[in-house]
Image: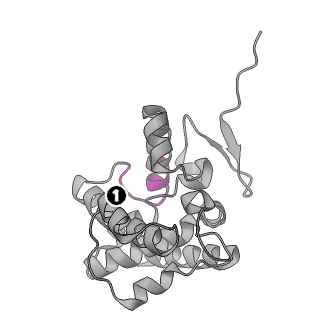
Amino acid sequence: MAKEPRVWQRMLSGRRLNLLDPSPLDVELDDIAHGLARVARWNGQTVGGHIFSVAQHSLLVEAIASHLDPDMSREWRLAVLLHDAPEYVIGDIISPFKAVIGDAYKAIEAGLLAAIHLHFGLPAQPAAALKRFIKQADRQAAFLEATHLAGFGREEAIKVFGRPDPLPRTVLTLLEPWPVAQAEEHYHQKVTAALAK
């Protein structure tokens, strides 16, 4: 008789997160920050002495979102910071590969995001307006990362990600890849601050 495949991931906190049936009780901010700081955007195909991590990407998206809406609510800020949080478990799959994999990946990602949202007191499914807002900030971040870190020319990036809005220099400083420990610490602090508001 064939053995059932293991569908849970053990975290450093000791939690076991089931990929097919994730529980909000098995979600921990320490695990998310630790994992996202070690996951490379662009499959690591970026310039610099360090990876550009998903944790740092999330901070970049939050900075862009804050520029777009300086009066963003605590819930929206938290959702922006957590928009790629499932990747602490499943890694950052590049968009072309997601298109090849199809719906199975999307279902796992959506289930994890729902559990993460519930853990942090957010609705399991974000409102359509929030999803659009996160997508807008995320695409601008992708454009900046593509042109500053991943070797895209400006015109190619515009075709793929759209034309970005002008952004302040404070946002652009987040494009310098950080060491893992710095990305983990800054991400953890930013989420904790959003939770405290």
- Identify the magenta region: 115-124
Q: Residue 147 at x, y = what percent?
A: 44, 72
Q: Residue furthest bottom?
A: 169
For this view, does 102 lie left or right of residue 136? Answer: right
Q: Residue at x 69, y 44 (%)?
A: 9
Q: What amino acid type is highlighted by mark number 1?
A: Val
Give the side of residue 33 with respect to residue 68, left or right: right
What residue did someone put label 1 on? 160
The image quadrant that residue 146 belongs to is bottom left
The residue under the point 38% across, 49% down is 124
Q: Nearer the viewer, residue 99 or 5?
A: 99
Q: Is residue 123 magenta?
A: yes
Horizontal and vertical percent position of residue 16: 68, 45
User: What residue appears at the point 30 percent right and 81 percent down from the top-left corner?
Assistant: 67
Q: Position of residue 184 (x, y in %)?
A: 63, 73
Residue 55 versus residue 96: which sits nearer the camera?
96
Which of the pair 191/44 is nearer the observer? 44
Q: Residues within 10 Å of mark 1 (few under 14, many from 20)?
A: some
Q: Find the residue positioned furthest to the left.
A: 129
Residue farthest along the top direction in this orientation: 1
- Relative vertical location of residue 98 with respect to residue 57 in this rendering, above or below: above
